[in-house]
Image (cartoon, grey):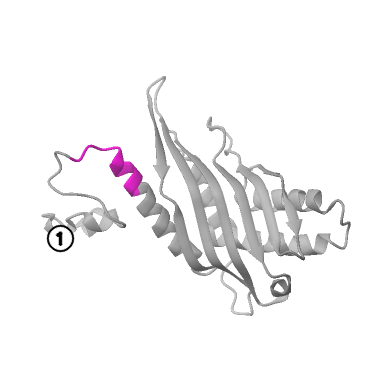
Amino acid sequence: MAKRALKILGGGVAIAVLALGIGWLSRNGIIESALEGAIKDTTGVSTDVEGLNFQPFAGDLTIKAITLKNPEGFSTPHLIKVQNLDLDFQLSNLWQDQVDIESLTVNGLDLKVEQQIPDNNLVKVVDTLQEKEQPESSGNEKVVKIGRLSIRNIKASIKVSAIGDFGIEEDLDISDIELTDVTSKNAEGKLSVAIANAVTTALLEKIPQDGFPIKLDGDNPLKDLPIDDIPFDIEDLIP
């Protein structure tokens, strides 16, 4: 999913350059529409892009908000809302085989995961992305590289809808994520590990640990689990 998102961003910048030849005054509206269409085609859900401002000669692209709506049948206001996205780049790099982006900063991310029986809104979008993912090319594929990726002010909510009025909803405050040298080839692994650790930490903060026989904390709380002391093989539980 992360790899696909980077390709969309890189493609969005390339579209922005082409849009310069169509009309300078209307360029932002053209890019917004093109980016909305590209994200919808990739994810399968409607997308709104608001407040896009592209300054190619200054090497800056800002977007006030990108909202990925829910797949059909889910009730949360949206799946993902990215706010205040700021992308810094060098115009001359956009024509290279490797598109070097100096930094990508997101100052506000709201993720609303909804679990119904048996569907999950996030899983549905991820499945759509995987279905449309093209096999790796052996040719000179354009690579997007971000020197510094920052995601701040992250909020997540998890809603479980069961039968009737019965259900669970929990809000989480997620720690900021700061990564370096993120590319369209390694983004999937780097982001998934960072997000997994951040979400795990947020969940553990909701659970009183006074009665726990172990202490779960630190930068990587998953490593604090005493897996070696468990009297059975976890791998045997995985089909």
Circle 1 crowding by C-alpha within 10 Å: few under 14, some 14–19, many from 20? few
Give the magenta part as a residue range: 200-209
Q: Quick one: 203 or 79, which is closer to the camera?
A: 203
* Left or right of 30 on screen, residue 236: left
Magenta: main secondary structure equals: helix
Q: Residue at x 68, y 53 (%)?
A: 62
150 magenta-colored:
no
* Left or right of 217 on screen, residue 151: right
Q: Quick one: 77 or 88, which is closer to the camera?
A: 88
Residue 78: image quadrant is top right
Q: Residue at x 57, y 56 (%)?
A: 105
The residue tagged with tag 1: helix, strand or loop? helix
Q: Quick one: 150 or 226, which is closer to the camera?
A: 150
Q: Which residue is mark 1?
A: 228
Residue 93: image quadrant is bottom right
Q: Position of residue 28 (x, y in %)?
A: 79, 51
Is residue 113 visible to us here?
A: yes
208 magenta-colored:
yes
